[in-house]
Amino acid sequence: MRQNAALQTESVTANVSIVLVDGMWPRGGAKKDAYIDEWYRDIAPSKDLVEWFSRDRDRWNDFYEAYRKELRERDSTLAQTLREHAQNEGLTLLFAARDEEYNNAVVLKDFLKRTR
């Protein structure tokens, strides 16, 4: 399982599921040109949490824990579907944040690996 900051415009690997995991479509990216298999906006952090975090690295630890809490409290169907993609054909989590180290896909990837 990997994460990628840019919208794919062509398939990276034919056997990998590519899933956008943001609540909003990335600015400047045309839906018709993007190569994604799914857009799971319901697994993204809440709008309030995203606005509070606002890419402030000083808030990372609190964001990390708060988003994990949101993920635990939600219906686990989407998380389980993502786990199955990762196990069966591979999975790329797409996100729009510029920061590749501190974003929701990092938290989601860790959550998917640590929980069952």
Image (cartoon, helix red, strand yellow):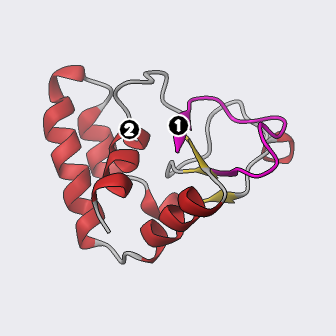
Q: Nearer the viewer, residue 104 or 106?
A: 106
Residue 54 in the magenta stretch? The answer is no
Q: CA distance from mark 2 to mark 1?
A: 7 Å
- Relative horizontal placement of residue 5, taking residue 67 as reference (left or right): right
Residue 13 falls inside the magenta stretch? yes
Determine which residue is flagged by label 2.
106
Whether 23 is drawn above or below 10: the answer is below
Mark 2 touches mark 1? (CB < 8 Å)? yes
Number of the label disc, if any, that sits on residue 25: none
Label 2 residue SS: helix
Q: Is residue 27 in sight in this rendering? A: yes
Residue drawn at the location 67% of the way across and 59% of the way down: 38
Q: Residue 69: where, in percent of width, then height?
A: 19, 59
| Image spot of residue 81 (x, y percent) | 53, 70
Given the image, on which type of amino acid does mark 1 rest? Gln
Q: Quadrant of residue 64?
A: top left
Q: Quadrant of residue 55?
A: top left
Q: Which residues are magenta?
A: 1-18
Q: As displayed, is residue 101 above or below residue 45? A: above
Amino acid at the residue labelled 2: Val
Let me know if residue 40 appears in the view. Answer: no
Q: Residue at x 45, y 24 (%)?
A: 100
Dot 2 alpha-carbon crowd within 10 angstroms: few under 14, some 14 to 19, many 20 or more: some
Q: Residues within 10 Å of mark 1 (few under 14, many from 20)?
A: many
Instruction: From the top left corner, tell me how far across and down residue 116 is, in percent.
Output: 32, 69
The residue positioned 38% from the left and 42% from the top of the image is 104
Q: Is residue 100 above or below residue 112?
A: above
Q: Which residue is mark 1?
A: 3
